[in-house]
Amino acid sequence: MSIPATVAASASILLQTGETQTSALSVEMLVVFAIIAAAVGLFVTQPIPLDVTALVVIVALVLLEPWTTISPDDGIAGFASAATITVLMMFVLSEGVRQTGSEPRTANGATRESGGSERGVDPRSSERRTE
């Protein structure tokens, strides 16, 4: 069945069941799109730290529950995910490295170990790659 035939069959089924599709954006969609746009803008420009931006987005989604349908329980449920905790710990780790000033030493050590190569160190051997 071709794509136009599939679309026509779907439209026929919708008409038979009395359902109609609307292409207009609902208020709920616009609220969520606005939050996403604000989040992307804040992440790109970084006027406030990234972790604060992420928390502000979660709080905004929960506070605007009538439009976003994100309940407080749903808002904090993501913190139970191992992936979320891993990302949070990476923020903590990177901030600790930044505050101690050890980032240049770490970068210089990594560069020295890789022999200046972007390909890095071969993890299967203790020797540097020469490619």
Image (cartoon, rainbow, N blue to C red):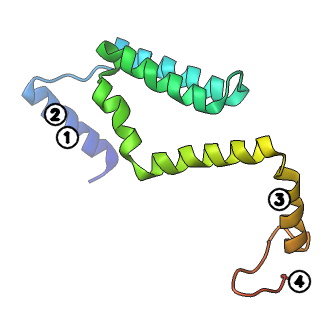
Q: CA distance from mark 1 to mark 2?
A: 5 Å
- State which tag comes first along the sequence, 3 or 4: 3
Say which residue appears at 36% left-offset and 12% top-offset. Answer: 27
Q: CA distance from mark 4 to mark 2?
A: 64 Å
Say which residue appears at 16% left-offset and 33% top-offset. Answer: 12
Amino acid at circle 1: Ala
Amino acid at circle 4: Thr
Figure check: 25 above or below 111:
above
Is residue 94 or residue 14 the one in the foreground? 94
- Mark 3, residue position: 106
Pointer 2 and pointer 3: residues touching (CB < 8 Å)? no
Q: Is residue 32 left or right of residue 128?
A: left
Pointer 1 and pointer 2: residues touching (CB < 8 Å)? yes
Numbered disc 4: secondary structure? loop
Numbered disc 1: secondary structure? helix
Q: Nearer the viewer, mark 1 or mark 4?
A: 4
Say which residue appears at 31% left-offset and 31% top-offset. Answer: 74
Q: CA distance from mark 1 to mark 4?
A: 61 Å
Q: Nearer the viewer, mark 1 or mark 3?
A: 3
- Mark 4, residue position: 130
Say which residue appears at 69% left-offset and 30% top-offset. Answer: 44
Numbered disc 3: secondary structure? helix
Callout 2: few (<14), some (14-19), or many (20+) C-alpha neighbours within 10 Å?
few
- Mark 1, residue position: 9
- State which tag comes first along the sequence, 2 or 3: 2
- State which tag comes first along the sequence, 1 or 3: 1
Q: Position of residue 89 (x, y in %)?
A: 57, 48
